Image: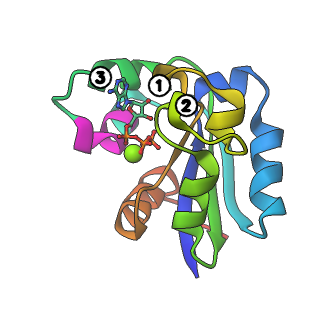
Amino acid sequence: METTLVLVKPGGVSRRLNGEILRRIEARGLDIVGLKLLNPSREIVEEHYAEHRGKGFFDDVVNYLCSGSIVAVAVRGTNAVKAIRAMMGATNPLEATPGTVRGDFALTIDDNLTHSSSDPEAAERELALWFPEGLV
Ligand code: ATP
Ligand code: MG
């Protein structure tokens, strides 16, 4: 069993895609074990994307995450990290396969709708950051 983090970014929330994204996660057979809507602080978003600090897109991606409400989802299941990454699709929606969230609903890399943890170590770090109170 693995637990991973999904964030529905502000673009996904404003386009009312929360239900669609949660539906796909559950339809795949994965369990939602943490769920909240929040307006994240700049501090938590900068910590979340710390690996990208110094890159050209860092300020843009931090501003995007801070531009509205997001939904944080903890997802548990067999091979959940890899399964969720595949379901969300390639970082650049133009390269994302149809049938993925980004391939079906996004067009540009600066508004690619979701985040998902890249590996189990990242998932553990990110879950502690977004769900310090723990999971069910
Ligand atoms: P995420 O971490 O959001 O799930 P990812 O793991 O597919 O996305 P990362 O390489 O971690 O991709 O990049 C984090 C985010 O930064 C991307 O989702 C995207 O919004 C933005 N980003 C990444 N690369 C670029 C780029 N070359 N130009 C603009 N924005 C970028
Ligand atoms: Mg990433």
Label 3 and label 2: CA atoms lie apart by: 16 Å
User: Mark on residue 129?
Assistant: none
> Does dot 3 land on a helix, a strand or a loop?
loop
Examine the image and state in which quarter residue 53 appears. top left
The answer to which of marks 2 and 1 sits earlier in the sequence is 2
Of residues 60 and 34, the one nearer the viewer is 60
Q: Which residue is mark 3?
A: 57
Judged left or right of residue 21, residue 85 is: left
Q: Residues within 10 Å of mark 1 (few under 14, many from 20)?
A: some
Q: Is residue 134 visible?
A: no
Question: Label 2: which residue?
Answer: 93
Circles 2 and 1 in contact, beta carbons < 8 Å: yes
What residue is shown at x 75% (from left), y 44% (from top)?
Answer: 21
Q: Quadrant of residue 47?
A: top left
Residue 42 sits inside the magenta stretch: no
Q: Position of residue 134 (x, y in %)?
A: 55, 66
Label 1, ligand 1: CB separation under 8 Å: yes
The amino acid on which the numbered mark 1 sits, given as a three-letter code, is Ile
Residue 126 against residue 60 in the figure, above or below = below
In which quadrant of this rendering is ligand 2 seen? top left
Q: Residue at x 77, y 32 (%)?
A: 17
The residue tagged with tag 1: helix, strand or loop? helix
Q: Tag 3: residue type?
A: Phe
**Residue picked out by circle 1:** 109
In-image side of 53 versus 59 (left or right): left
